[in-house]
Amino acid sequence: MSSNIIETRDLKKRFGNFDALQGMTISVPQGAIYGFVGPNGAGKTTTMRILTTLTKPDHGTATVAGFDVLKERRAVRRAIGYMPDEFGVYEDLRVWEYLDFFAACYEIPENARKTLVNDLLELVDLSHRREDMVDKLSRGMKQRLSLARTLAHDPQVLILDEPASGLDPRARVEIRELLAELARMGKTIFFSTHILADVEDICTHIGIVEAGQVVMQGSLDQLKAQLLETRDIVITLLDNQQAEAVKTIALGRMGVRTVEFITPRAGRTRLRVEMIDTDEGIQAFHRALFDAEIVPLGFQEEEKTLETMFMKVTRGLVT
Amino acid sequence: MSRIAWVSVEALSPREAALNRLSAVMQATGALHAVALLALLALGLLRPEGGAWAAGLASGLVGDAPLFILLGLSANMGAALLLAVALLGQENWAWPLALGAWGANAAALLAWGYLPALALLIPLSWLLWQMWRDRRAYHANPVTIKELRGRMRGARAFAIISVFVLLMGAFTVLLYLITLSELSGLSVVETGQVGRTLFRGVVAVELALIVLVVPALTAGAVSGERERQTYDLLTTTLLPTPTFLLGKMVAALGYMALLVLAAIPLQAISFLFGGISQVEVILSVVGLMATALLLGALGLFFSTTTERTLVATIRVYIFTLALVIGLPIASNVLLGGAYGFAVNGVGVVTSDVGREVGAIYADMLLTSLNPVTTALATQSILVNQQALLTFNVRLATTGELLPVIAPWALLVAFYVAAAGGLLLAAVWQMRRRSV
């Protein structure tokens, strides 16, 4: 197969009357940090459960690290570290005992476990809490401990379900840094989220899902390039009359795709002009307004974010 | 097709697959013993005159060899099945279990020429060799360690044992005072009576505790992990299913064993009054442990049949009730307590020898399936017959002597075998559900 470490083809899964997955096809390249973005109920968790051999798809195939999730489950389990969205607590264990237990579950011999546990705690910066009870940790620390657990058997792929959900801003940044660090160590990270800021900061790849299907997928650079094809100019004007005039001028120009009124700010009318043009073309458009004796209060190119892209490709099908 | 298979092979490591084969050999050995046991019983009991060897036993022609064979088959069946589970779980205690069974059978073969021992010795010798070849497979169970670390930490475990021993102590004192006031009117007081009453009371409370607590301890083993949302975590690790189940089992029983051991000094108070020997104390502990083993396995089996702890708990208590209360009532209705009467030297009302022998043996087996009747019968045997394993009862019809087995030995063998079978069924059930 190709260099894709996770590959699914046309996954379908039905729970009762609810179609959780309707042909989910994703590919995650080796070494990527892949952000799996979508609204709640879009099928992110179901996809992850299939990839971690916990759920059987009704239809379709999936491979992780070259192993089939249905036919070679054991090899798949060895290759992945999985963190579900709920933190599984053994409230009566100490931090090091928790890691020691899971390391033992991965058949790591007893004499190797002590150093391993210490290294893992060092990595997630929890060495000082080694002897504390697990349920005494803050949510951010639990999440870091969870991450340490997924690393116990040195897997190639980390599958993380909402690693940053419910964390305070500081803990979120810490997790984010940790993920970046793990990616530098050569792990492929496949994580789901609905926080776009996370994706923008650390992801190399992104897949946007809605209603059990991928609506857009690829490397972040690719997607941004696609997105940057058109440019948005927001023009602030004194009143509606001027705005109508600007609209007529804009629609008369080459390269302008749409013109729409957007929410007024401080009583000023605002227009968004979506156009494909060079910098010189935008200057010419600006000058054309002055030629028509309209002086805009503001003429500004809007920076495009993932959020705008996200809103564009999803249709809000899932409530 | 792969869904019907015992377990889909792709989820097993080469070592697990190899252990599966070793376990299958021990399961087959256990099944062989069970078939032999049933054949022996059928031979002995089915015919109306009491069967061939039962009639022979009654006439003193055969001696008690068939009884020892019956006992040996039951014990080896239990050992084989328990070993089959221990192998699957890669437990380090598979070693002492296998070596102990090997040693006991070799000794029986050499000392008494007990040939049926070969049925276990041959597969067991092969097994020990195989175990030695992959000796790294057997290690301390991580689930047991985790459970015990959680359960025994801090003041809670200590407090529970202390309160338990205190309550048991108070109960013993109360029992002593009651017994004393009952005896105070009599001119001759037999202190052995006091000792036996106290001992019986303590054992009864311990048995009640085991019957009430042990099923609940293991009924939540699987569903509890689901409710804590750690079940998925464990499923995605390489932890073998049998290791998980046995880890839960051993941890629950270890805790129970601690409580039983902690109460031994209270049982031993009876020594002050006499009427009780060390043998009885040891037998009571062995019997209680076997009961805990069976009920624990029962709870574990039911916890693999459902996802909800409550359902599993209800199911296991229904079975426990049937075993502890329903069975003695049923056997009493069907057989009229023939075995107990015979032990106490009272005959059954029948004129047919064969029928009497049949009733005594059938009741002996049913008595051995229930901890309460077993405890009562064992004590009266120890007191009236001074016998540990086998002894003779006098038939009411002909006045001849009939050899019978003490029920505790059968109970331990049956319970161990049933526990082994239930644990295997639990492993099968859980692997099947995870496919």
Image: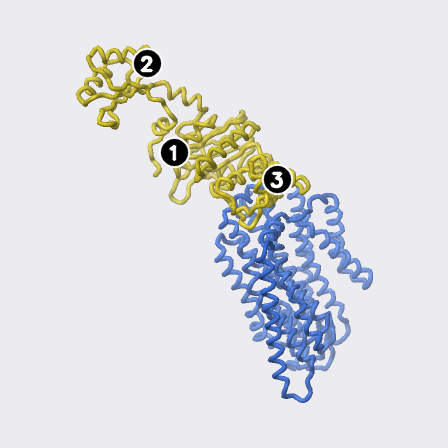
Chain colours: A yellow, B blue
Provide the residue designation for mark 1: A210
- Toward the front, the furthest residue is A128
First in sequence, mark 1 or 3: give its number: 3
Please provide percent x and percent y for residue A51: 50, 36
Amino acid type of the residue that numbered disc 2 sits on in the rendered structure: Asp
**On what subunit does the disc labeled 3 rest?**
A
Q: Nearer the viewer, mark 1 or mark 3?
A: 3
- Which residue lies at the image location 75% right of the left edge and 70% below the top edge? B64
First in sequence, mark 1 or 2: give its number: 1
Secondary element under disc 1, as helix, strand or loop, is strand
Amino acid type of the residue that numbered disc 3 sits on in the rendered structure: Val
Task: Give the camera-side residue of B77 and A240.
Answer: A240
Please provide percent x and percent y for residue B32: 68, 57
Secondary element under disc 2, as helix, strand or loop, is loop
Q: Is residue A289 above or below residue A11?
A: above
Provide the residue designation for mark 2: A277
Left or right: A138 in relation to B351:
left
Q: Residues within 10 Å of mark 1 (few under 14, many from 20)?
A: many
**On what subunit does the disc labeled 1 rest?**
A
Q: Nearer the viewer, mark 3 or mark 2?
A: 3
Residue A117: numbered disc: 3
Please provide percent x and percent y for residue B171: 59, 73
